[in-house]
Image (cartoon, rainbow, N blue to C red):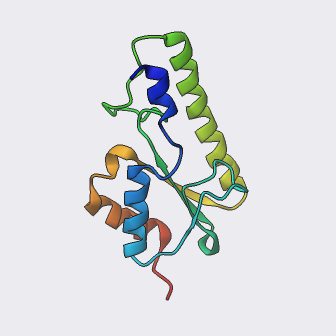
Amino acid sequence: MDRSANMRAIRSKDMRPELAVRSLVHKLGYRFRLHRKDLPGKPDLVFPSRRKVIFVHGCFWHSHQGCKTAHVPKSNLGYWVPKLQRNQARDVTNVEKLHAGGWKSLIIWECEVKDEKRIRRDIPHFLGKVRR
């Protein structure tokens, strides 16, 4: 498969890391909305009553610093370097806009999803107690 066909096959939502986080958050007792288009960056999980959002970022696409899967491709640097820099700049802008609107955000990286114990600790710390 050539690179462009591979890139076309990559979806922006409902990817495996996002589904894993959604499942875990639901098991912890939290309820959420998905991909609200009226919020900057269309956060993956939205907790409207708490005014908090969670983004599940792919390490490659969002250039996770220090992560081995966040490398820049060796070919076509003229395309990839600006593309990945734009993604990073857009992420910063979206979080700033959310913060200015009174929202708090948490970013969970694709490589962190494997550490379920950490996510089980971080989610309740970020969201607070489950309201029943």
Q: Residue at x 34, y 32 (%)?
A: 69
Residue farthest to the bottom, as pictured: 132
Q: Is residue 30 above or below residue 75?
A: below
Residue farthest to the front, as pictured: 1
Q: Is residue 78 above or below residue 67?
A: above
Viewer-closest of 25 and 119: 25
Give the quarter of the image for residue 46: bottom right
* Residue 2 point in image, percent of width and height: 42, 19
Q: Is residue 5 above or below residue 91?
A: above
Q: Is residue 132 left or right of residue 120?
A: right
Q: Residue at x 44, y 41 (%)?
A: 58
Q: Is residue 92 left or right of residue 124?
A: right
Q: Residue at x 62, y 48 (%)?
A: 95
Q: Is residue 60 left or right of residue 53?
A: left
Give the quarter of the image for residue 32: bottom right
Q: Is residue 117 left or right of residue 43?
A: left
* Residue 68 point in image, percent of width and height: 30, 30
